[in-house]
Image (cartoon, rainbow, N blue to C red):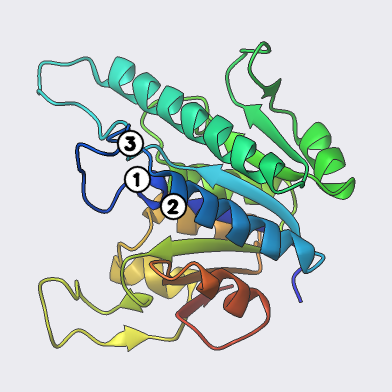
Amino acid sequence: MYKRIILKLSGETLAPETFSKDNASHSFEASRVDRAAKAIVDLADLGVQVGVVMGGGNIWRGRFTDAMNPVLADQMGMLATIINALCVQDAIQRLGHGATVFTAQEMTRFAELYRADRAIAAMERGDVVLLAGGTGHPFFTTDTGAALRAAELRADAVFKGTTVDGVYDSDPHKNPGAKLIRDITYQETIERGLKVMDISAFQLCREQKIPCIRIFNMDDLDNILRVAKGEDIGTVVHL
């Protein structure tokens, strides 16, 4: 059993699968937000300390024109992750579980300013810690943010959900003959250029000796618990 996990949760997990005029938001669907919150609480109820690095893709997908300033575009993405973290915090608290949002940017009326020692203290008292605002700097994705927070918070594993079953030797969306890789080292992943996560995330996990990244299909959020309990699902990337 893992003691402390950093879960990378995509913004799309919270969004409507299809949009209809009956839904109040293009970005959120109440049932999917509640489903994500329950999966996180169920994970914490196993006795695992949980940090969740939020994505923002349901709200902002980056520059919509090459003329747009890329730094400002990335800052907008950071704000999107904070909106998502506040949304998930509300849903977790409605389930009766503690949750604290930490942001990489100073906005203390909304959330705590991230500091590793404070985030660890919150996890040790039983709160789910929602880590928003990315790394706080442009040009880094939330995948790299998840690796960074795992290193700072001394996590046992990073859980990364995808829309496929794990790491493949080529893009399974383009190559129907792509083969699933169940077990691979950080170094092999970097050398082969496998792109299920940013290379910088793999490099950071390798350098900081994060024991493993678990990569699996998160269309079924119950897979989070299955992986945490040790089931052989998806791909293990390790030292």
Give residue 5's position: percent from left, percent from top. 68, 59
**Tag 3 near tag 1, CB within 8 Å:** yes
**Tag 2 near tag 1, CB within 8 Å:** yes
Q: Secondary structure at mark 2?
A: helix
Residue 99 horizontal side relative to residue 130, left or right:
right
Q: Name the residue at 52% across, 42% down.
A: 145
Residue that badge 1 annotates: 15
Residue that badge 2 annotates: 32
Give residue 75's position: percent from left, percent from top. 39, 20
Of labels 3 and 1, earlier in sequence is 1
In the displayed structure, 206 sits above or below 32; it is below
Cα separation between marks 2 and 1: 7 Å
Of labels 2 and 1, earlier in sequence is 1
Give residue 183's position: percent from left, percent from top. 47, 85
Q: Residue 40 falls in which quadrant of the image?
A: bottom right
- The image's mark for residue 121 is none
Q: Name the residue at 74% across, 29% down.
A: 115
- Badge 2: few (under 14), some or many (20 or more) residues near its Cα, within 10 Å? some
In the displayed structure, 185 sits above or below 84; it is below
The amino acid sitting under disc 1 is Ala
